[in-house]
Image (spheres, rainbow, N blue to C red):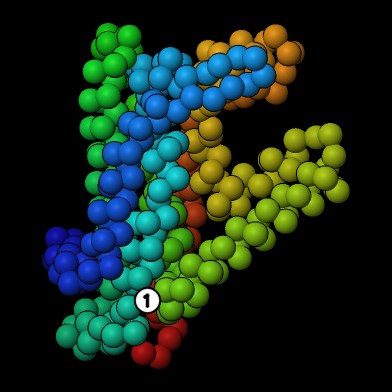
Amino acid sequence: MFRLLQIEWIKLKNSRASKVLIVVYFLLLLSISLVSMIQFNIGDIHIAIADQGIFNFPFIWHFNTYFAGMFKIFLLLVVVSMTANEYANRTIKQNLIDGMSKKEFILSKFYMVLLLAFISTVFVFIVSLIQGLLYSDYQEFLSITTDLVFLLAYFIKLVAFFSFGLFLGILIKRSAFAIGALGVWYIIEQVIYSLLRWKFFKDTNIHDKVMQFFPLHAMSNVIIQPFTRFNKVKSLAKSTNTKELLGIDYHIHAEQLLILVIWTFLFVYLSYWLLRKRDL
């Protein structure tokens, strides 16, 4: 494992674009703190995000992992470009000539996926912990440790997303086209969702039950938006009888994580299968 990671690390160090994307990604994660400056109005109600308890334990774990997930595309670009560049630079063929098996090649990429996801998760944990210790109104041990499962969900979500990128990089061999294919797949899922919701299963939640098994929907469903947990938004929902806002389930469910683990396995296996079938 460490030998394969070392090989990937050498490739990463020699890729200026990947290093820039990684730096931008972690700078964006740090920018989450700037959210406290946001203020807006809903009707006659003025809402300042800083007053809503977003830095309170345990809510901060939900809030920060949700926002950090918005920036995961930058690390996906790293995974896709490093995979596609193996074909463009013919390093994949050289690695195989030097004795690396196709299984080891895929494992080296997957280990890098795991490492990037792990480092990102640890970074979000450290940033969130510092913010919470500085600004949270609740600093009891139980408050701090409650909802840490959001970090686990964030890690699994990143691994699944990056594994999807790995598969697309192996499948298409070109970074731009692989990212374009991801965008096309997103549109396909949205079209299917719209058809199920508005044409075939109106006034039911069957569309949600079906879409939870699609990869991108599964990734977005595991950590849902935290905005309606804000006290003032909840108060507005109560005053306007908006049951949809109050009936949202914010918890992390084991079956959602299992779906992402299965997709991760499929993406990695299919990447290996493609590599085995191709004549390099």
Question: x%, y% of residue 276?
Answer: 40, 80
Quarter of the picture holding the N terminus:
bottom left
> Which residue corresponds to mark 1?
84
Q: Nearer the viewer, residue 219 or 19?
A: 19
* Lateral position of residue 28 relative to residue 251, left or right: left
Q: Nearer the viewer, residue 167 or 96?
A: 167
For residue 59, above or below residue 88:
above
Question: x%, y% of residue 183?
Answer: 56, 63
Confirm whether residue 190 shows in the render. Answer: yes
For residue 232, above or below residue 127:
above
Question: x%, y% of residue 88?
Answer: 34, 85
* Lateral position of residue 48 relative to residue 119, left or right: right
Q: Residues within 10 Å of mark 1 (few under 14, many from 20)?
A: many
| Count of marks overlaid on the render | 1
Q: Which residue is rendered at x = 48% and y = 48% of the image?
A: 260
User: Mark 1 falls on what kind of element?
Assistant: helix
Quarter of the picture holding the C terminus:
bottom left
Q: Which residue is rendered at x = 51% and y = 46% of the image?
A: 219
Q: Which residue is rendered at x = 16% and y = 67% of the image?
A: 13
Q: Which residue is rendered at x = 68% and y = 53% of the image?
A: 190
* Lateral position of residue 118 relative to residue 198, left or right: left
For residue 110, above or below residue 63:
below
For residue 224, above or below residue 22:
above
**Picture quarter containing residue 166?**
bottom left
Identity, as a three-letter code, of the amino acid under mark 1: Ala
Confirm whether residue 154 shows in the render. Answer: no
Q: Nearer the viewer, residue 157 or 240?
A: 240
Question: x%, y% of residue 145?
Answer: 30, 19
Q: Nearer the viewer, residue 133 or 32?
A: 32
